Image (spheres, rainbow, N blue to C red):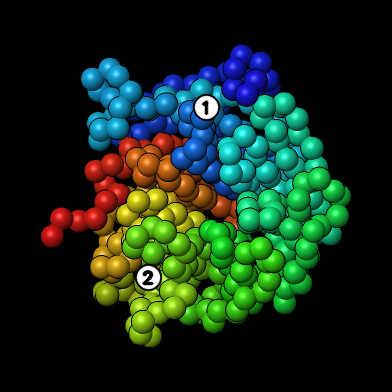
Amino acid sequence: MTLFGNSGSSFGSSSNSNSNKEHFIQEVPNDTVSRLRFTGANSSNGQFLASTSWANDVRIWQVATQSSGGSFGNNGNFQMATQAKAMKNHEGPVLDCCWTGDNTKLFSVGADKKGMLWDLGADSFNQVAAHDQPITCCAYAKGNNYECMVTGSLDKTIKMWDMRQSTPAKTFNCPERVYAMDLMMPIMVAVTADKKLLGYRMDNDPSEWKVFESQLKQQLRCISIFKNKNGTEPFGFACGSIEGRVAIHNFQPDKPVDNFTFKCHRGPNNTSSRDAQEIYPVNDIAFHPNYTGLLATVGSDGKYTFWDKDNRTKIHGAQNMNTNNDPKKSISCCTVDHEGKIFAYSVGYDWHRGHESNDPNTKPQIVLRNVVDEFKPKSK
């Protein structure tokens, strides 16, 4: 892959750690990061992290870990280093991205109503998808007889693109604007306005499957599908809302109480005051790749928290990480690498507050955190 050598649109390197626990990426976008995605387990060129941002750009860094003994290893005590590799631009804010199955191409979508495919080997960046309104989310799907990119848009459609033609291979009409989606073969679930949750079967002939009833009362913002305990197939999903609450929904619950909600990203209750409790939106959710019952949430309170959904407990929480208690800074997105060792998150301005409070001179942060000792089940 020539892009990952010395050629390509390189823009420098970075290697800055304040401790063995956290590493701060240096050459970050000039505006809030909307999505972070690690490459999968079958990446033959090492591990890479992609970002999309409101600064109209897509960026890629190479990520390396080194054990304290001086050799690259898998123990809990390791240092991290990143090298900025390349960058491409959309014509508007970029809202989501996803890797192809072989980690050689990156698909990105955004407010310019375009879906762009970045072939990292050829360093080509071509449009392969289009909508009538901004494209908010995307996913990669591969069945026995097809391979495609899936896009969701504010034009109330979900489209499938085989990347070889300018028209979609399939279009699903939705009842409302599409805000988010997640896909784990053979299931896809999309979040739309008016709290709709739409399920699809993505087998050989992708089709509408079922509509899930939301357990949450306010607008939904993010969704993540989780596996069964054996890690072999999709088992349900978690979705977060602007009301500081997450809903856990099993596709086939044994009993009604298996589906539940829990509060998160809220200020402390002040029992001695009449002031209302501060409630913050849940901006993103990421499940651990190996401990399938564990999930991370990030919110507009500038905090991240790790949870055990099966035991219904909080296993680790951070207090306003790297935000200096600035109420205008939030954690906009997060992801976990395929080994469950590195938790990546980004701190930046919350554009849901409107443009008036934004300081254009303040750049976002992208932080990699060693979570080997934190993001794991509690000892019984």
| Residue positioned 56% across, 63% down in the render | 186
Using the numbered discs, state the Cα–Cα distance from disc 1 to disc 2 in whole angstroms.
Answer: 40 Å
Give neighbour class at mark 1: few <14, some 14-19, many 20+ (Cα, 10 Å): few
Q: Identify which residue, 170 or 79, lies in the foreground.
A: 170
Residue bearing mark 1:
45
Q: Nearer the viewer, mark 1 or mark 2?
A: 1
Q: Identify which residue, 51 or 24, lies in the foreground.
A: 51
The quarter of the picture where residue 171 lies is bottom right
Residue bearing mark 2:
263
* Relative side of 167 to 322, left or right: right
The three-letter amino acid code for the residue at tag 1 is Asn
Residue 56 to residue 287: above or below: above
The percent coordinates of residue 18 (x first, y second) are 34, 27
* Relative side of 363 to 276, left or right: right
Residue 360 to residue 67: above or below: below
Give neighbour class at mark 2: few <14, some 14-19, many 20+ (Cα, 10 Å): few
* Relative side of 294 to 111, left or right: left
| Residue positioned 47% across, 75% down in the render | 251
